[in-house]
């Protein structure tokens, strides 16, 4: 059985969890307080970051390389298209959410509201929270623009790009930081991906001290 060292609300860990679940790869989840820099964890990943996936006696790090490794080892059902142009678009959007969306939104909302408390790093920075609340509107509008032209974010089929976006948005939805009324198109997209069997363990997450809102696990939100 695979073993994933993770933090429940980490979008990078959630992206890997979604890929594993979509491929029906059984996986044991081990919650890792990576900020405590335990020697055993640092031996698995000297960078001191999650996720870390143990798969077939290998320790794999960095969420996107992990997901692409899973895709190559377990190609069905596919999460990457075959055509080079289509694969580029998936990778571009994965980078968009993991870099730009993360720095402008996730780090300013999730990390300020949740991670600081968990890591005992002081109080949330209200300025960063306001910046994140402003920035997410732009990103939701961009997603709506894409989805007005495509069935899924990167094209006509669901891909790793959709999982990357859903990983970030589901983490923020856990703390009620997504305005689903801003775009029916984006809300419909999230409803589709949220209803997939791969999403079940994500919707079952419970983080001590941070109860999810009532709509979080509701497929008819």
Image (spheres, rainbow, N blue to C red):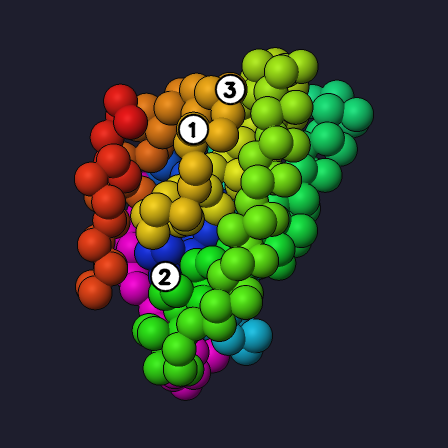
Q: CA distance from mark 2 to mark 1?
A: 28 Å
| Label 2: which secondary element | loop
Looking at the image, is mark 2 or mark 3 nearer the viewer?
3
Q: Hey, which residue is sitting farthest right in the picture?
A: 85
Q: Quadrant of the C terminus?
A: top left
Q: Which residue is mark 2?
A: 7
Q: Which mark is residue 181?
A: 1
Residue density around tag 2, few if under 14, some if 14–19, many if 20 or more, within 10 Å: many
| Relative side of 178 to 154, left or right | left
| Label 1: which secondary element | loop
Q: Which mark is residue 94?
A: none
Residue 83 appears in the rendering:
yes
Q: CA distance from mark 2 to mark 3?
A: 29 Å
Image point 43% across, 59% down: which residue? 110
Is residue 37 found inside the magenta-colored segment of the image? yes
Among numbered discs 2 and 3, the one appearing first in the sequence: 2
Q: Which residue is mark 3?
A: 185
Image point 32% across, 24% down: which residue? 195
Is residue 69 found inside the magenta-colored segment of the image? no
Among numbered discs 2 and 1, the one appearing first in the sequence: 2
Position in image of residue 206 (x %, y %): 21, 53
Residue 190 appears in the rendering:
no
Image point 46% across, 51% down: which residue? 11
Position in image of residue 196 (x %, y %): 34, 25
Residues drawn in magenta: 26-43
Looking at the image, is mark 3 or mark 1 nearer the viewer?
1
Q: How many marks?
A: 3
Q: Nearer the viewer, residue 114 or 47?
A: 114
Position in image of residue 119 (x %, y %): 37, 78
| Label 3: which secondary element | helix
Q: CA distance from mark 3 to mark 1?
A: 10 Å
């Amino acid at each position: 059985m695979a073993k994933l060292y993770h933090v429940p609300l980490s979008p990078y860990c959630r992206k890997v969890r979604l890929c594993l679940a979509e491929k029906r790869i059984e996986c044991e989840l081990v919650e890792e307080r990576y900020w405590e820099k335990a020697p055993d964890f640092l031996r698995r990943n000297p960078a001191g970051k999650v996720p870390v996936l143990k798969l077939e006696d290998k320790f794999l790090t960095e969420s996107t390389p992990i997901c692409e490794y899973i895709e190559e080892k377990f190609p069905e059902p596919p999460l990457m298209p075959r055509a080079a142009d289509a694969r580029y678009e998936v990778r571009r959007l994965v980078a968009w959410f993991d870099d730009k969306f993360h720095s402008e939104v996730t780090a300013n909302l999730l990390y300020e509201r949740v991670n600081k408390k968990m890591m005992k790093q002081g109080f949330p920075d209200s300025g960063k929270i306001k910046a994140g609340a402003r920035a997410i509107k732009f990103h939701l509008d961009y997603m709506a623009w894409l989805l007005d032209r495509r069935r899924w974010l990167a094209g006509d089929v669901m891909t790793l790009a959709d999982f990357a976006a859903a990983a970030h948005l589901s983490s923020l939805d856990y703390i009620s930081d997504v305005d689903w009324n801003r775009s029916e198109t984006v809300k419909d997209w999230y409803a589709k991906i949220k209803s997939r069997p791969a999403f079940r363990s994500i919707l079952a997450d419970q983080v001590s001290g941070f109860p999810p809102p009532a709509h979080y696990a509701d497929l008819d939100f």
